[in-house]
Every structure is written in structure tokens, then in C-alpha cells.
Amino acid sequence: MKKVVRYLLLIYLLSLGIAFVGFLLDSDISENTFTYQMFEVFMLSIFLFGLLAGLFCLLYLMFSFFKSLKRNENQYSK
């Protein structure tokens, strides 16, 4: 369980980094306040976290499913 929490934390830090890079690379002149801009960065990082965590969970479950199939196949072949 510690591994999953660590992976989720790394995924959130990655999504937060992507959101900050997008904020820094934005070339439009902003008329919003700084707090509103940071709110946008935070919400984008939450959105990216949801997408990346969903992708991670999908891949993790798929690999564990194929690993269990391979393990069962080796068990029956003996």
C-alpha cells in the first residue's frame, strides 16, 4: 500500500509541475489576479492528476491481470 501512495504522490507532483510549466510558458498578458492564476494552476494540476492516475490504474490493473494469467498458465503446465 505504501507503494501506491508513493506513486500517487509522484503523479500529483508531475501534474503540478506540468501545470506550472504551462503557467510559465503562457505568453498571453494576464489581467487576472495572482490568486486566480494560482487557482487555475491548482485546478489544472487536479485535472491532470485525475487523467494520469486513471491511466496509471488502468495500466497497473492490466499488467497485474496478465501477470496472473501467466502465473496460472505456468502452474497448469507443470
Image (cartoon, rainbow, N blue to C red):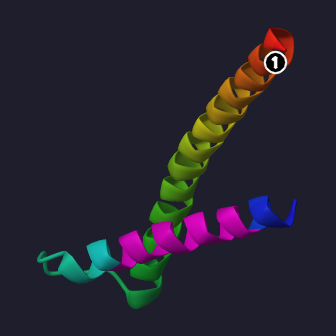
Q: Position of residue 24 (x, y in %)?
A: 25, 83
Q: Residue at label 1?
A: 72
Percent coordinates x, y for residue 58 in the rendering? 61, 35
Is residue 8 highlighted in magenta?
A: yes
Q: Residue 36 location, x and y as percent?
A: 44, 78
Give the residue at the far bottom of this rendering: 34
Q: Which of the 4 image quarters holds residue 65?
A: top right
Q: Is residue 16 magenta?
A: yes
> 60 or 72, which lies in front?
72
Name the quadrant of the C terminus.
top right
**Position of 5 compared to 45: left or right?**
right
- Magenta region, mostly helix, strand or loop? helix
Which residue is depicted at the point 85% across and 67% down? 2
Residue that protrudes farthest toward the top in the picture? 76
Question: For the point 11% across and 77% down, which residue is it?
Answer: 27
Which residues are the magenta region?
Answer: 6-20
Amino acid type indicated by mark 1: Asn
